[in-house]
Image: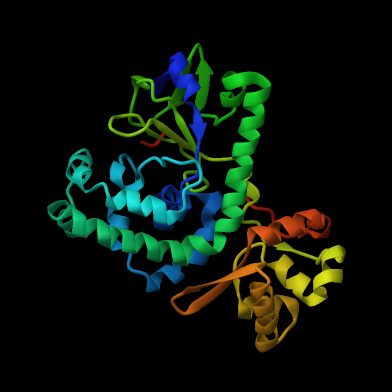
Amino acid sequence: MTLDLVFTASDLANLRFAISPLGEVVAAVRVVKDPSAHPLLRPWAEQVRRRLRDVEWGLLSDLVPVPTITIAGFTCTPPSTSMPDLELELATMRGAAARVRADLDEVPGPRTKRVQALYDDPEKGLDRLATEVTGFWRAAMAPYWPRVRALLEGEILYRARLLAEGGARRMLADLDEAVTWHDGTLSIRHRYVSGPRPLRGLGLLLVPSVFVWPRVFSVTLPPYQPTVRYAPRGIATLWERREVAPPEALAAVLGRTRARLLAELDQPASTRELARRAGLSEPGANQHLTALRRAGLCTAHRTGRYVLYARTATAEALLADSDLEDGYLEETPTPRSNSR
């Protein structure tokens, strides 16, 4: 089946991009519930599933069924700005109480008790859902967000360059292997939906998303902004675990130990894990990590019994400028391999 999004001149003029933290949460729930269907994302899923044991996310899980055919629109409304934070998107979700029942009526199958309670009292249910999303975000998403966001922003910059070089046709040509552009129509190979869908002069919102891989999600029906969520380039290497050597230039400024710890944070990790990798005692590693955190180079995220450290965007920029790639020694390669 093929879903055809039909563009007018007005729709082309309103083509835009956005990043959606809430959309990433909703897509990530599918990965946690069925890691085998997302082999490129399994390293992340394996890390976070044990931490999610301490988090209440039952309603969120119920609203994101696996296999995924339809997700109620209010759970991840298309973002109204290009770079919203999670708090803004949750505020939008809380304000969608009037849409809850209509959206849930469009979802096939029986409702769980938790979803029925949301249906019966949308305002109270959305407050509960927002709390669960926040808990899931802190445990499973926030420690990884700097590197995920960097990948998403890089994808948008890449698309913007293609748009400048060759217009919409060039920019949309390699969006995804399931997506093609021809004569003003964006066609998406789809598992459940087919036929033409006009964009109603609203244009199309393109949202790159790590956790939708390997599928493409679409929103095409009123009252929501027409949206396509697709996987960006580079996911295959996002979770690779690598041995790293600290950049010499950065080590000269921070000291070799702190530069090594910062380099090891290519994925969020605990004090114990970082101490083991760097050959330090846990108190010693904690002292260095505290200094890096105070300098704005890493953040600490408590998730139940765990405290994970993650690099900040500033640290990512410093490491990139120091040509960190020359220090990578790869271990075992990673296999490569709405809704579509």
Q: Can residue 286 be seen here? A: yes
How far across and how far down the image is residue 38, in percent?
49, 49
Name of the residue lying farthest toward the left: 120
What residue is rendered at 64% in x and 37% in y?
157
Badge count: 0
Give the residue displayed 69% in from the left and 78% down from the top: 291
Q: Quadrant of residue 225?
A: top left
Using the image as rendered, state which of residue 255 and residue 13 is in the foreground: 13
Q: In this picture, is 121 found above or below 284?
A: above
User: Residue 7 location in percent, x, y?
Assistant: 44, 17
Determine the residue positioned at 46% across, 67% down. Answer: 139
Relative horizontal placement of residue 89, taking residue 39 as reference (left or right): left
Would residue 149 appear left or right of 65 to someone viewing this image?
A: right
Q: Quadrant of residue 286?
A: bottom right
Residue 102 screen position, x and y as percent: 18, 40
For the C terminus, which image quadrant?
top left
* Left or right relative to 249: residue 12: left
